[in-house]
Image (tube, rainbow, N blue to C red):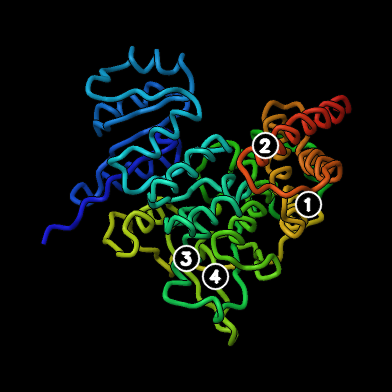
Amino acid sequence: MKPAMKRIAILGSTGSIGQSALAVVDAHPDRLQVVALAAGENAELLASQIAQYKPRIAAMATGAAVDRLRQNGSTAGVTIADTGRDGLVSVATHVDADVVLCASSGTEALEAVLAAIDCGKTIALANKEVLVMAGALVTEAASRRGATILPVDSEHNAIHQCLHGRSLAEIRRLVLTASGGPFRGRTAAELAAVSAADALKHPTWRMGRKITVDSATLMNKGLEVIEARWLFGVRADQIDVVIHPQSVVHSMVELVDGSIVAQLGVTDMRLPIQYAFSYPERWGGPLPPIDLARAGRLEFEAPDTAAFPCLRLAYRALEAERSLPVVLNAANEVAVARFLDGRISFNDIPVVIERSLDAHRPAEVTTLAAVRAVDTWARAFSQDVAGTVELKL
Ligand code: MG
């Protein structure tokens, strides 16, 4: 029997995850078909993706990007959606899409993910900000609608694999592994003068700029702790982080009897993306298996939250729940953008975030409008804080 074709929509098709997803589609042309693509500003690459995959609908972030898209190739037969969040919604809810891969960075795709859930689509979630901002809203909508959210983030994808067929009652804790980033082992004093260029040199994973800086501060792991809480329905004190520089063990689950189940694999995002696309099946693939003898030593150590306070701040936000994770995420985005522009120092990133958390009075965020209102407040407040920090440089 011919296998059923899964029809894929990709939010963020020109980014690192989006391109890896298209490589997975290329490897399985008999099982995966691209029907909808959304990109930010990279019109040249989206034009070539449209030529190759012939989606029914495509969207870009801005009108200027759409103009460049039309100059770069034919869009005949392709519906060009509105720009901005509306375009993401149109792509994510296209009637032909079965699975929506959310691989755009930041929080622009929140409405689109909720709209796709409302349509009953399966969400392959590579974006962690969506769950950090609106974890309760998104997971409640998914369970109400019976929509599945499949994690693509490598750690959560690993945990999803380790949990396969187990009940929550068997689980003592989840253990997220972290590479430690390019500054592992350094003290806070040694981190004072590191530059954006230094932070962008990640030892094991090749990713976008924002997430690479988040990996250097350990905020990426902090956001992943919050993401894990919502994806797997566990408490903050059931989620641990261990530094594992080789990034061979993608994450682990400790069971109530003390057994630990781990998932190991090559550091290539095509592996988790393919698992999310194939789930509940598992397909063969083009990636080589991991060569354990060549991998050699696997090391584990505790994270240093004195040098990397962002991880501690993420736990603080998660334990407070309500609106604090929204503030954490927004302040982090503001601080990282300022750091990438060379306007604040590496060690000022957690300062901006912590002052924003301190200034915020936690509130319930049970609607999208409430989430966006806290987000707007936090961005404005953290811009001001970053401005005062900036003057010290
Ligand atoms: Mg990850």
Q: Nearer the viewer, mark 3 or mark 1?
A: 3
Amino acid type, residue under disc 4 in the picture: Met
Residue denoted by label 3: 160
Question: Residue 348's x, y, as percent?
Answer: 80, 38
Which of the two residues, 43 or 186, is positioned nearer the viewer here? 43
* Mark-to-mark CA distance, 3 and 1: 28 Å
Mark 3, Cα crowd under 10 Å, few <14 / some 14-19 / many 20+, is: many
* Mark-to-mark CA distance, 2 and 1: 16 Å
- The residue depicted at 72 percent of the width and 49 percent of the height is 364
- The residue depicted at 76 percent of the width and 29 percent of the height is 380
Which of the two residues, 162 or 264, is positioned nearer the viewer here? 162
Q: Where on the picture, by quarter, is residue 360?
A: top right
* Mark-to-mark CA distance, 4 and 2: 28 Å
Quadrant placement of the C terminus: top right
Amino acid type, residue under disc 2 in the picture: Glu
Q: Secondary structure at mark 3?
A: helix
* Mark-to-mark CA distance, 3 and 2: 27 Å
Mark 4 in CB contact with mark 3 (< 8 angstroms): no
- Residue 324 shows in the view: no
What's the mark number on residue 333? 2
In the displayed structure, does residue 194 sit left or right of residue 87? right
- Residue 129 higher or lower than 77, as above or below: below
Q: Secondary structure at mark 4?
A: strand
What's the mark number on residue 309? 1
Residue denoted by label 4: 252
